[in-house]
Amino acid sequence: MADYLVAIDLGTTKVVSIVGEKINNGQRFRIAAYAEAPSVGIRRGQVENIQSVVGVVTSTLNTIRAIAGIPEISEVYVGIAGQHIRYIENRVEILRPNYEAVITKEEVKKLESDARKLHLNSGEEVLHAIPQTYSVDDIDEITDPVGRLGYKLTGHFIIIIEKGISTKHTDVCMQRLNLSLKELILEPIASARATLSAEEKEMGVVMIDMGGGTTDLIIYKNGIMKHTAIIPFGGNTITSDIKTGCNILFDQAEKIKIQYGSCISSMAPENKIVTVPGINGREPREISFKALAYIIEARMVEIMDMVISEIRKYTDRSKPDDRHLDAGIVFTGGGANMTNLREFVKLKTGMDVRIGKPEYVSNNSSDDIFHPKYATAAGLIMCGFDSREEAEENRNTNKTPSAATTAKTSETAGNDDKKEDDARAKQPLFKTLMKLITGDGENEEV
């Protein structure tokens, strides 16, 4: 594996370490190995106990290193999520001194860099600056300004900010593992990278990623991320409801949720019952499928009401042409496998729904990876390669002078030659020699 990349998904319920490589000219990815372990020391997406997380990650990294035959892992890409993430919009502009020179990629990069320069609260850090649209002078809604002419270039960005200490804790974890943290990637962005097609992003789509601690939402339209939000309820919330409502252990609640739960109570069987063993000699508990479905449906109604509210926030502020999300909803994450989920979400929203699994993954990868709960991990690999390619492209761009730079260099060189000739012409010996050569100084003595 000459060209491979390692990523770590630090989830609330599980930690996944994964290694992948690009194939077929970069259009697809092969997942060479992955390892999963229950999360310890992570709550609602935030690293809280460094020592516990280091232990879990060490175990998963050792497993993938052995399976993939990797001698050493030196750097990783890590996913981050949770309620400590906040989002703001920022507008920045630059005034260009030369109207006749076309706008370059370097100027667009400068806009992004300027957009990141914010007055942040103590401990906060900018994770991503997501471009929305650009304006050149009086022309708005431009997706790519490179190659245009204009005096004023303006960029509109969504800035994603980490506002807790989770980033510092994650960095310390990687240091203790002797790993270089190449990049922190917002996990919903990674999930979208793995599950959404370019056509869906263009038409307008809502991606919902239900994890253990939170449910993350991203809206794409015209190929651009337009809105994102974090809903503070996830799969573990439903499990806790079942635990409390049925008076059983959390692990028991999780098991019956997965095996027998349904999002629609009216579709649950009337006369089926699941028996849960009692604790320490106590009588076993009998829970009807119908009662279980009622508990799940009640919490899912609350979660989807919050999802609908976030969708309306986007549509209410959007232009009429941008409000249509014709590709509907893609539901992914560990919570995406609940029975009757598609039907429930469609009833609640009136939108088309599909379950999102990792796309762009080659068939010679493990079959188990094609599961909604691994969308984030697979997406981290894809985002990592995207970042690596972008960095390489920027290095090549900086090495290759632009046409304007080349012309300026040639002009500068010509001016320097002229200055040197003028300086030499002022020297007495040089003036005398020139007169002898031209015949103007025959009567003069040298």
Image: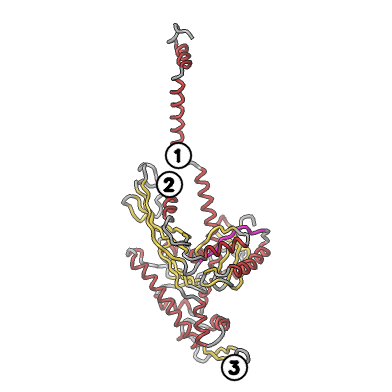
Q: How is the image coloured?
A: secondary structure
> What SS does tag 3 mark?
loop
| Magenta region | 72-80
Q: Residues within 10 Å of mark 2 (few under 14, many from 20)?
A: some
| Residue furthest out toward the left | 138
Q: Residues within 10 Å of mark 3 (few under 14, many from 20)?
A: few
Of labels 1 and 2, earlier in sequence is 2
* Mark 1, secondary structure of its residue: helix
Q: Which residue is mark 3?
A: 283
Q: Residue at x 60, y 90 (%)?
A: 278
What distance separates the C-alpha of mark 1 from that of mark 2?
12 Å
Q: Quadrant of the N terminus?
A: bottom right
What kind of residue is marked 3?
A: Glu
Q: Is residue 214 left or right of residue 177?
A: left
x 46%, y 25%: residue:
420
Q: Amino acid at mark 2?
A: Thr
**Residue 384 position (above or below residue 348):** above
- Along the horizontal axis of the image, is 143 left or right of 43? left
Residue 221 at x, y percent in the picture: 40, 63
Label 2 element class: loop
Residue that sits furthest to the bottom in the current view: 283
Q: Of discs 3 and 1, which sits in the foreground?
A: 3
Is 8 situated above or below 290? Answer: above
Q: Is residue 195 visible?
A: no
